[in-house]
């Protein structure tokens, strides 16, 4: 049997679950990055604070506080990039030993599937993790660009280059944060994709829960209300 023949053994529910997880991944990402003006996401609210940060940065002296913040942001991207690499290695190790994994899953689900199908399911997880790794690496580099721009910003509000440089630093900082958040979403959906090992129904449930969790944190969380100045429930 070639790979096409193996894939044809997936049920319609499997294909629906696979399509749903990718649609939710793309859809929630687009909505978070393009929210309505009347109901902004946490990411959009934080983007405004990043711009305000750079305005304050121009006149702050010394700038040790700013450098520490940026260093902590870069450490976060490095940590998650390393985590993705380790997770990818772990999943690929499972791909090479799917017989044992299939045996465990069959005990849980009381169903038997072709080993190739288990490998396909694991490769979907690898796809999400790889995307996350690439986003974290790019975010780390953008934070590095931001550091250079901040270093080139005059520490004098009257200098004609001060605020233009600060605005550039703010926008690069925002782009770095966007890619960092994209990486986190990929990790969320990678965890959701693991549920496919138990069958299409668990995949649909995990996808729905992942979507709900991301929506709650971006559009209906207590931190969001605090950022907007409203701590009432």
Image: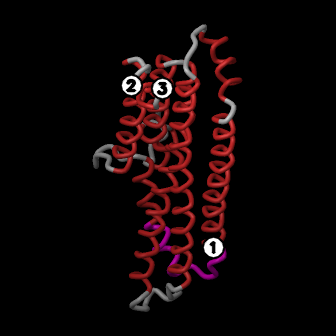
Q: Is residue 71 visible?
A: yes
Badge 3 element: loop
Task: Residue 143: name its quadrant.
Answer: bottom right
- Mark nearest the camera among 2 and 1 is 2
Viewer-closest of 3 and 140? 3
Name the disc covering residue 1, or none.
Answer: 3
Q: Residue furthest bottom?
A: 159
Viewer-closest of 34 and 187? 187
Residue 84 image offset from top left, x and y in percent: 62, 48
Q: Is residue 192 visible?
A: no
Q: Which residues are magenta?
A: 51-64
Q: Is residue 109 left or right of residue 232?
A: right
Q: Earlier in the sequence, mark 2 or mark 3?
A: 3
Badge 2 element: helix
Badge 1 element: helix
Residue shown at the point (57%, 19%) measured from the top left: 198
Residue shown at the point (64%, 38%) measured from the top left: 91
The stretch drawn in magenta includes residue 74: no
Residue shown at the point (46%, 42%) measured from the top left: 225
- Mark 2 and 3 residues: CB-CB less than 8 Å, in contact? no
Q: Earlier in the sequence, mark 2 or mark 1?
A: 2
Residue that label 2 marks = 15
- Tag 1: Cα neighbours inside 10 Å, few (<14), some, or many (≥20)? some
Residue 89 lies, with reference to residue 155, above or below; the image says: above
- Mark nearest the camera among 3 and 1 is 3
How far apart marks 2 and 1 lie (CA) works out to 48 Å
Residue 41 image offset from top left, x and y in percent: 40, 46
Residue that label 1 marks = 67
């Amino acid at each position: 049997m070639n790979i096409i023949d193996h894939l044809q053994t997936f049920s319609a529910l499997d294909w629906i679950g696979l399509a749903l997880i990718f649609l939710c991944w793309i859809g929630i990402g687009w909505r978070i990055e393009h929210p309505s003006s009347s109901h902004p996401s946490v990411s959009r609210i934080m983007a405004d604070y990043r711009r305000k940060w750079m305005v304050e940065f121009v006149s702050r002296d010394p700038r040790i506080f700013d450098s520490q913040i940026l260093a902590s942001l870069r450490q976060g991207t490095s940590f998650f990039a390393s985590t993705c690499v380790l997770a990818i290695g772990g999943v690929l190790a499972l791909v090479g030993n799917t017989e044992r994994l299939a045996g465990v899953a069959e005990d849980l689900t009381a169903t038997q599937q072709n080993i190739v199908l288990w490998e396909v399911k694991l490769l979907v997880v690898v796809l999400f993790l790889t995307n996350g790794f690439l986003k974290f690496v790019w975010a780390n580099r953008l934070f590095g660009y931001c550091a250079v721009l901040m270093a080139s910003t005059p520490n004098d509000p009257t200098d004609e280059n001060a605020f233009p440089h600060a605005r550039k630093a703010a926008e690069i900082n925002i782009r770095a944060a966007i890619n960092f958040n994209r990486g986190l979403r990929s990790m969320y959906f990678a965890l959701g994709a693991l549920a496919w090992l138990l069958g299409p129904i668990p995949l649909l449930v995990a996808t729905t829960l992942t979507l709900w969790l991301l929506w709650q944190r971006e559009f209906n969380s207590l931190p969001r209300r605090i950022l907007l100045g409203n701590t009432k429930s």
